[in-house]
Image (cartoon, rainbow, N blue to C red):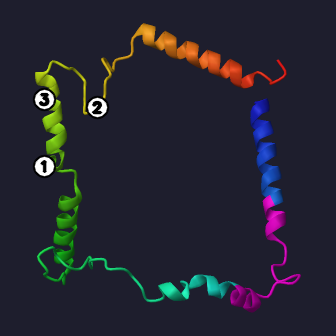
């Protein structure tokens, strides 16, 4: 019950502070919106050398065969076409799959490409090594240079 009172008190204090900050007059002091806009407006345009330079990117409204997207249904088909092209298809992994197959023929387990890990499963012994390392590292990190 005591904790609820403390939390309620903290919330009330924050609410009062927030409302006090919101009640101030925004136009008091040296605040001039037109002057501020004039100062900031140059930052909303690209530098002169990049003005109207958009790069040679392909329009998303063109299918890969060159046809133009015209309707909502076309956009759904175009979206699917883009997603299918950039999804991680198995044909992109042919070399890696070949490497894995060769490693299996050679008798290596859990060896992918140049990885030389014998086993990926944590064991009690490997966990103990990790714990010892963190204990040593945290102790040496907290140790002052004078010690």
Q: Which residue is mark 3?
A: 102
Q: Residue at point 51% right, 16% down?
A: 130
> Is residue 19 part of the magenta span, yes or no?
yes
Q: Earlier in the sequence, mark 2 or mark 3?
A: 3
Question: Is 92 displayed left or right of 41 in the figure?
Answer: left
Question: Is 83 displayed left or right of 11 in the figure?
Answer: left
In terms of secondary structure, where does tag 1 sit?
helix
**From what the image shows, is residue 56 above or below residue 100?**
below
Q: Earlier in the sequence, mark 3 or mark 1?
A: 1
Q: Earlier in the sequence, mark 1 or mark 2?
A: 1
Give the numbered dot on residue 114.
2
Give the numbered dot on residue 91.
1
Q: Residues within 10 Å of mark 3 (few under 14, many from 20)?
A: some
The answer to which of 18 and 90 lies nearer the viewer is 90
**What number of labels is visible?**
3
Q: Are marks 3 and 1 in contact (CB under 8 Å)?
A: no
Specify start and end residues of the magenta stretch as a single range.
Answer: 18-39
In the figure, residue 2 lies in which quadrant?
A: top right
- In the rendered image, the quadrant that contains the C terminus is top right
Q: Residue at point 14% right, 44% down?
A: 94
In terms of secondary structure, where does tag 3 sit?
helix
Q: Where residue 66 appears, x then y in whole percent?
A: 14, 80
- In the rendered image, the quadrant that contains the N terminus is top right
**From what the image shows, is residue 51 above or below residue 112?**
below
Q: Nearer the viewer, mark 1 or mark 2?
A: 2
- What is the spatial separation of the Cα atoms under label 2 and label 3, in whole angstroms? 12 Å
Q: Where residue 47 appears, x then y in whole percent?
A: 55, 84
Q: Residue at point 17% right, 26% down?
A: 103
Question: Is 141 displayed left or right of 113 in the figure?
Answer: right
**From what the image shows, is residue 81 above or below residue 112?**
below
């Amino acid at each position: 019950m005591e904790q609820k009172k403390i939390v309620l008190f903290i919330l009330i204090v924050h609410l009062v502070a927030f409302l006090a900050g919101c009640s101030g007059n925004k136009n008091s002091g040296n605040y001039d919106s037109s002057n501020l806009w004039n100062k900031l407006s140059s930052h909303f345009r690209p530098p002169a050398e990049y003005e109207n330079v958009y790069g040679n990117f392909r329009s998303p409204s063109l299918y890969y065969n060159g046809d133009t997207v015209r309707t909502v249904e076309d956009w759904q088909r175009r979206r699917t076409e883009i997603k299918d092209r950039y999804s991680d298809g198995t044909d992109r992994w042919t070399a890696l799959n070949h490497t894995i197959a060769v490693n299996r023929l050679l008798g290596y387990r859990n060896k992918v490409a140049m990885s030389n890990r014998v086993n990926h499963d944590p064991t009690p012994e490997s966990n103990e090594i990790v714990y010892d390392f963190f204990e040593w590292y945290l102790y040496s990190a907290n140790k002052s240079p004078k010690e």
